[in-house]
């Protein structure tokens, strides 16, 4: 299997295990080329089974799965898997191999020379945000987030057109998870892979997915739609309940408009605040947090400042979150370099929301 894969298609696919359990029941679904498709749903709904049938880690009982028009059951599983990258929870790295050699595993299996495979590994380390000094380290010497980056790099090493990701970020803490999600979106913007991503987290699904497939218990596909449509028009009560009460707030992530910025006068550590809430910035005008009251500002006085709104994103969800999470009631907007750009009020965001809805 070489490049140019167009779609992955499930046609009436059912998986029935030996004990009679039906994990997937009559699945019809087309995964679009060059997009991220997310399978989401509660435990036992068949989302992981569906993913693993694509590369024959599990084989379907009935129906057909095709990759670029070719039945996955037609050839040898090893040949199929050479064109499909696979990333799992906990990365699944070889503990006795260095990071460089973990990433080079598949190219070496494909017959690449060791220098070529290692050069590819070092190139991919840079691509996924790992420094060259980590090449000779072992997995146990890396954080969970770094290990997941290695797992992604290893899956990309032979440049497969398809990437399967089975809850790859669920074992890391929320801050690291968000950074890994952002990194995946950045990589996808550069590489344009056909990605199937499994998660149980609806927030992760709507953030990452170009399209989202919601599975219900028993292996039935409940709805398959773009995230904005899923949030705005759930197909039934199950989808409505699974998407959750906050779907109106999540929908803000798909609305964008320019929010007018207010002015804000910050201080640096060591300078004097004049009273009330005052924003503190560092030497590069990057926000550090807030202080309250008058007098000289000490580093120990600075309180966490809530989330920051990147102006370039245009996201109304990001803007509103910045305004609501700030202890002062003023959200903080930053430019592409993370420097202070101005303040945001919740009222300004709601006015922009009304304008965006009118325009839509």
Image (tube, grey):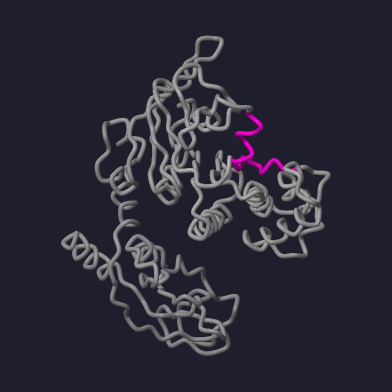
Please tell me which residue is depicted at 29% across the width and 59% down the height of the picture. 255
Is residue 30 placed above or below 192 in the rendered structure?
Answer: above
**Image location (x, y in percent) of residue 33:** 44, 45
Q: Is residue 75 magenta?
A: no
From the viewer's side, name the closer residue of 135 and 285: 135
Q: Residue at x 36, y 73 (%)?
A: 330
Q: Quadrant of the C terminus?
A: bottom left
> Residue 288: x and y, percent?
53, 75
Image location (x, y in percent) of residue 307: 45, 65
Work out which residue is located at the far top of the displayed protein and give it: 19
Answer with left or right where residue 220 lies relative to residue 49: left
- Say if the magenta span includes residue 89: yes
Taking 103 as reference, is 251 left or right? Answer: left
Residue at screen point 25% across, 46% down: 232
Furthest residue to the left? 358
Residue bounds of the magenta highlight: 77-93
Number of callouts? 0
Q: Residue furthest bottom?
A: 271
Quadrant location, the N terminus? top right
Image quadrant assignment for residue 58: top right
Residue 191 appears left or right of 107: left
Which residue occupies the foreground of this view, 4 or 210? 4
């Amino acid at each position: 299997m070489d490049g140019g894969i167009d779609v992955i298609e499930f046609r009436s696919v059912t998986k029935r295990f030996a004990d009679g359990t039906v994990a997937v029941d009559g699945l019809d679904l087309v995964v679009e080329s060059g997009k991220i498709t997310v399978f989401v749903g509660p435990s036992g709904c068949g989302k992981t089974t569906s993913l693993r049938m694509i590369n024959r880690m599990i084989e379907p009982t009935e129906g057909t799965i095709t990759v670029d028009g070719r039945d996955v059951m037609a050839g040898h599983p090893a040949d199929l898997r050479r064109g499909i990258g696979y990333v799992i929870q906990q990365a699944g790295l070889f503990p006795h191999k260095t990071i460089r050699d973990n990433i080079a595993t598949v190219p070496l299996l494909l017959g690449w020379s060791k220098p070529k495979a290692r050069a590819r590994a070092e190139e991919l380390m840079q691509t996924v945000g790992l420094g060259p000094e980590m090449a000779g380290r072992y997995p146990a010497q890396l954080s969970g987030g770094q290990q997941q980056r290695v797992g992604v790099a290893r899956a990309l090493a032979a440049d497969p057109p398809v990437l399967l990701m089975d809850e790859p970020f669920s074992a890391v803490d929320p801050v690291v998870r968000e950074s890994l999600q952002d990194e995946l979106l950045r990589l996808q913007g550069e590489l344009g892979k056909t990605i199937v991503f499994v998660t149980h987290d609806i927030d992760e699904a709507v953030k990452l997915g170009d399209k989202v497939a919601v599975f219900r218990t028993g292996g039935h596909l409940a709805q398959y739609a773009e995230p904005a449509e899923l949030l705005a028009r759930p197909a039934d009560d199950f989808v409505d309940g699974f998407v959750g009460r906050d779907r109106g707030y999540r929908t803000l992530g798909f609305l964008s408009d320019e929010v007018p910025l207010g002015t804000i006068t910050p201080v640096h550590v060591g300078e004097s605040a004049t009273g009330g809430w005052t924003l503190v910035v560092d030497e590069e005008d990057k926000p550090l947090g807030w202080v309250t009251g008058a007098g000289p500002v000490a580093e120990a006085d600075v309180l966490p400042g809530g989330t920051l709104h990147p102006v370039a994103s245009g996201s109304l969800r990001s803007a509103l979150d910045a305004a609501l999470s700030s202890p002062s009631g003023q959200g903080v907007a930053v430019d592409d370099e993370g420097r202070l750009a101005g303040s945001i009020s919740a009222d300004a965001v709601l006015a922009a929301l009304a304008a965006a809805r009118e325009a839509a």
